[in-house]
Every structure is written in C-alpha cells, then in structure tokens.
Image: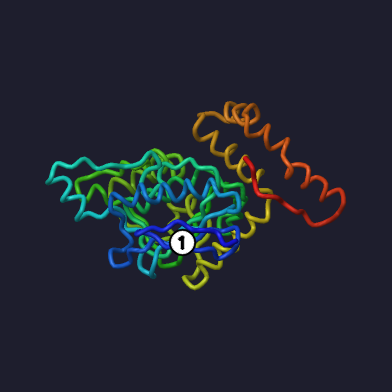
Amino acid sequence: MPLDLPKSPYAVLSLPHPQTLLLTLSRPQALNSLPSAAHHDLASIFAWYDAEPSLRCCIITGAGDKAFCAGADLKEWLDQVEGGVRRDMPQEGFGGLSRRQGKKPVVAAVNGVAMGGGMEMLANWYEGLPLCVYKADIGMFTYSDIVIAAQHATFALPEVKRGVIALAGALPRLTHTLGLQHTSFLALTGRTLPADSPLLRPLIAQVVPASKLLPTALGIAKEICGNSPDSVIVTRMGIRSAWEAGGVEEGTVKVMGGETYGRLVEGENHREGLRAFKEKRRVRWVDSKL
C-alpha cells in the first residue's frame, strides 16, 4: 500500500527511494524563506518521519537552483515587530530542524543560498549521523548528519546586518562545530562564504557540481538505508549524547544504560546482522521498532 505523505504549503514531499523521504522547501519565489507558520508545519513533518517505521533517511533541499533557504520571511517579521506580535517558534526550532533532536538522520542537499535561518538549520547537523564520511581534501573522517553542497552554494549568518541575531540555536552549535574564532568571524561580520571556504570544512561533507547534488545525497541515503535501522538510531543517539551530556564518558554511560540500547540488543535486527555474517549471506533488515 502506498505511503500517505503529509501535505504542506511550504514543502513538497516525495519518495525517491522506498525508505527515503525527500523534502523540498517550495517557496522559490522568496528564495525558500520561511514564514512563522512553516516552522510548526515542518516540525510536524519531521515528527511524522521519525514515527513512520518504513522510512530510514530524509533528504532536505530547496526548490529551484538559487536557494536552499534564505532564512526568515523578513517582510512578515517586520509586520510582526510593528504590530507587537511575538514570534512563535516550536521547540524544534527554525524549519523544525535547527534545534531538532529527532530519532532518524536528515541529509541536507544545499542547492544555493543558505543564510540566516537556513544556515541555522544546517548548524544542527553536527549532532550525529551513523555514517563515516571521508573528506579526502583534508584527510580526515567526520561523523555528522551530512551536509552536501552544490559548488555555487553560499552560507551566511547576516542577522547583525538587519539588527537581529541568530536565535534559533546556531551560535552555540556552530561554536562547537567550527570553533570560537571561525564562528565569531562568520556571525559578527555577517559575511557570505562560498561552499569551499576552509572555515566551513567541518560543516560540509562534500561539495559537488549542481547536477550531482541530489544523486550524491540519494546515494548517501541509500547507504544509510542499507544499514540496520536499529543501529542507525542508537548510533546517532550515541554521537548526540556527547554533544548534550558535555563529556564523552558521560555520553557513553547514558547510551549504554539507556532503555533504547537494551531494546536494540533484544531486537530482530541485532540477531539478523550477526547471523547474516556467520551464514555469509545478504542481511535482511526489518523496520525498526525502537
């Protein structure tokens, strides 16, 4: 039976692969900037994605070739300020992602401008993806929710140029990811950086030609979907725990002693992976029940 996808006025949802959700922000006439109502709408979509057992990975991108997301709808923001309306943001943050904890990984395919809130959505991708990506240009491995960028993509936190600040979670997260000095340079100048900027290397896993952006992201998603869905969820939790707990040992204890890890050990996929190795056959994962 076909999966009944949620409907949204701010995004188009599709299934490029049976286990992969593609979410395309769909306001190209406004550089995919997002009004206030979009944050709650998108947060509900990501909650649905986490709860849908058949889905194992999500890709987010923007419609068109100019912008991933240009941040908040500034015209609406001005109307709210002048009208005395307090801006409302869900716990998950800008676009339902900038402060999202979530259960399953999200891969960003940045197809153009990522500024303000769009950049804040990406800043949260330091927090864990159970896939090791080799960055050949600098000879290192990074463990993170993956950001793939088109060669023409640009990144900025221009809030200081508009008399506002990046309040959706990016500042402390980027300080962890990029370092104090690089984050200060980015956020205090409001400068726009190209995808291949050395300052952004810890954030962006790969920079590819625009024509290869979605195929690259989909290839990564398929690789994730080929792994144990239970292991993906708990591995992501383990990576994230160090970010939230404040220490590597505390994070390890939190995951090992947690209920979810126990359910993984008792689950079908735990045994299936080991049996497939012993029997030298292809693994047959079942949808996660975590």
Question: Which corner quadrant holds the N terminus?
Answer: bottom right
As drawn, 226 above or below 169: below
Q: Is residue 182 left or right of residue 126?
A: left
- Residue at 41% of width from left, 58% of height from top? 7
In x, y percent, where is residue 162?
20, 50
As drawn, 169 above or below 152: above
- In the image as oriented, which residue stretches furthest toward the left? 82
- Residue at 31% of width from left, 41% of height from top? 167
Q: Is residue 266 left or right of residue 6?
A: right
In x, y percent, where is residue 255?
61, 31
- Residue at 33% of width from left, 47% of height from top? 185
Choose between 85 and 9: the one closer to the eye.
9
- In the image as oriented, which residue stretches furthest toward the bottom? 211
Badge 1: residue crowd in 10 Å (few <14, some 14–19, many ≥20): some
Q: Is residue 142 left or right of residue 256?
A: left
In x, y percent, where is residue 149?
46, 61
- Residue at 43% of width from left, 51% of height from top? 122
Applied colour scheme: rainbow
Residue type pointed to by label 1 = Leu
Choose between 290 and 34: the one closer to the eye.
290
Choose between 152 and 127: the one closer to the eye.
127
Q: Is residue 277 left or right of residue 222?
A: right
Question: Which corner quadrant holds the C terminus?
Answer: top right
In x, y percent, where is residue 128?
54, 44
- In the image as oriented, which residue stretches furthest toward the right? 279
In the figure, residue 29 lies in which quadrant? bottom left
Which residue is denoted by mark 1 in the rendering?
13
